[in-house]
Image (cartoon, coloured by chain):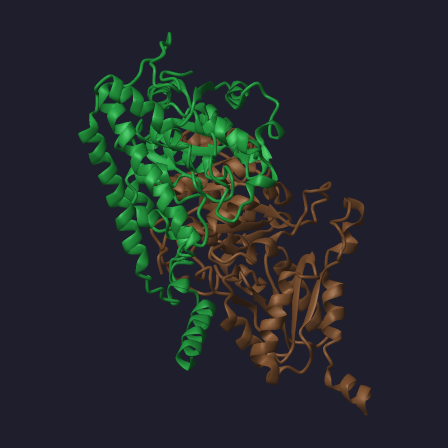
Chain colours: A green, B brown
Amino acid sequence: MRLVDRHGRRREHPSFTAPDHAVLAELHRAMVIGRRFNQQASTLARQGRLAVYPSSMGQEAAQVGGVLALSEQDWLFPSYRDSVAMVTHGVDPVKTLTLFRGDWHSGYNPHHYRCAPQCTPLATNASHAVGLTYAARRKGRDVAALVLMGDGATSEGDAHEAYNFAAVWNTPVVFLVQNNHWAISVPVHRQSIAPTLAHKAVGYGMRGYNVDGNDAAAVHSVVSHALAEARAGGGPAIVEALTYRIDPHTNSDAPQRYRDSAEVEYWAERDPLARLETLLRNEQIVDDGLLGIYERDAERVATAVRDRMAVEDKLDPDSLFTDVYAAIPPALEQQRRELAEELRQV
Amino acid sequence: MAHTPPTPPTGTETAATASGAAASAAAAQGAAEVTMGAALNRALHDAVAEDPDVLVYGEDVGPLGGVFRVTDGLTSTFGEERCFDSPLAESGIVGTAIGMAMYGLRPVVEMQFDAFAYPAFEQVVSHLAKMRNRTRGAVPLPVVIRVPYGGGIGGVEHHSDSSEAYYTHTPGLRVVTPGTPADAYSMLREAIACDDPVVFLEPKRRYWSRQSVDLPVRTEPMERSVVRRPGSDVTLIAYGPMVETALEAAEQAAAEGRDVEVVDLRQLAPFDDATVAASVRRTGRAVVVHEASVFGGYGAEVAARLTEQCFHYLEAPVLRVGGLDVPYPPPKLEEHHLPGVDRILAAMDRLQWESEWVEGHG
């Protein structure tokens, strides 16, 4: 499914139409900011200001297109490569990086942003989304959830349990599979021999969609449709977005050991930002002035991240003890006192 | 404390003890005989009735009432919305419970048997135990995972594991196990009201154990260990299925002139050092008893802590009595694996009583 080809030309589709001009412009703006954020975070990782950064360079359309399809009250369940999705969803960019900076395992209050903590064990947050939407429905609230997962994650048992629970309970969850072709160094053909990853929906009685993941308009259109169907009681869905991880797995990866640079070039020619910018210019939806504003917005985000990251947060070792349990148990209180004593003696 | 404070036990020790004297006192007051299974069932009924956010689900917990009937009548009384059968997938069961708790529900899920809970291990260890800490308190997870555990019922393979140490090694979890029907009721109510995730281990061979007790009952707070039987010569430390066995051993030892104190740990993690250490300082001798294999077992932690905290009070090394270091045996051989009264008495005999000490070193 594709609505905008790699040359920025519209493609007709019998079932789906592209979003309106305002949404197309917003998709582009969010991708421009997202790409700049990816670059900035990768730079911070090279400088040692982040312990690690898993870049989603090249996947901006899949993340932005999915997230902008959510309604105000909906929840996002990201994994570790979904910082761009989180920033698009409204999470403070610096708090998005708390995990990678090594300050804490998650930098924000999930309820504040309607965004679960970034999930590192693959696919394990998918069932959380099923439970959360189930609970919301019981409480009479219209809440859907978007779960972000990669191609590798679809091999995990937890993905399949979540698909099945969502389908049986008919909870409004859309599983957006960003098939970026590589699970670190393992190509997708070693994960599955199904015709597409969207086919996995069939066995669970779910709808499955396969979409050009570098076409933000198509991702937005399909995820919006899937969310609307799910809200109306039509059941959850898997949306497979075909995209590509242009950057290494993380800053410590060595992709030349397992993949050909020609493949990267092939996908770079299918860049999600270039094609939407071409369409927006050709159809005079945006002009140089507006594109310049997007660039400046992106630069402002990057500058703010850089400046705020230059200041080291004061980390209080006492915070190790305070939230393990609702109240600190006596034996842990003892260790708390001992650590405080150790620190006094330093 | 964030959880509901339990009401203190009324009258004598009716609630907090399974000792014969208190049980007969309760019987004299007209209390009914209740099995542990029935007490757990009543706790679930009362919790569901009291709090609209509590719901129960798992495998076969609906119309069947669970393979041990602990959820009997919940679906027919409260409807499908409050107690229902889920797909047969333990990781999914715990994972969805986590999501529900993130949105304000208080799910109580059942793992059908100890060994069938292992598929959920990653959810328990990587998410359930860590979510509050990861979110700096913003997302507490009031989830109760009920696990019938332990052997002694003639179960075929994978139906008799003592899996407590897998959970107690994980900070962020409360791991509790009742040893009496009164505790089963009270601790399950407390676990459901608790804002921490609780792994609630039910000693399945004791589902049919009886006690005279009026329900509802509130016993000691679950994080506190209790002295089930006072004694002055040696402390027997037990929990879950071994509480009853330890009390039997104490009875027999008394007939032989040895005064045995029995401590029921109740909450295994976080550990209540104070109660058991105070007991051992009084008696000077200690034996830890559990069904699980001894190596790397929970008793090692208890023994190490007692050695650290009571070293100068100890007359003998702290001993451990447990299952053999073998995979859980088939039903016809399990009696050789499970610690019984004789093995406990034999261990107590090895506690360097004065006469032996003199003989050995004289």
Residue nearer the viewer, B141 or A241 = A241
- The residue lying at 43 percent from left, 52 percent from top is A46
Count of number-bearing discs: 0
Above or below — where is B241 with respect to A206? Answer: below
If the image is split into quadrants, where does the C terminus of chain A sit? bottom left
State the image quarter where residue B55 is shown.
Answer: top left
State the image quarter where residue A334 is shown.
Answer: bottom left
Residue nearer the viewer, A103 or A253 = A253
Residue B164 pos. (x, y %): 60, 54
- The residue lying at 42 percent from left, 58 percent from top is A324
Residue nearer the viewer, B64 or A42 = A42
Residue B273 pos. (x, y %): 51, 71
Above or below — where is A162 with respect to B170? Answer: above
Above or below — where is B127 with respect to B351? Answer: above
Residue A2 pos. (x, y %): 40, 16
Residue B289 pos. (x, y %): 66, 64
State whether residue A91 appears in this view: yes
Q: Residue furthest top?
A: A14
Above or below — where is A266 with respect to A318? Answer: above
Is B172 left or right of B155, judged from the image as shown? left
Residue nearer the viewer, B116 or B92 = B92
Q: Residue furthest left?
A: A289
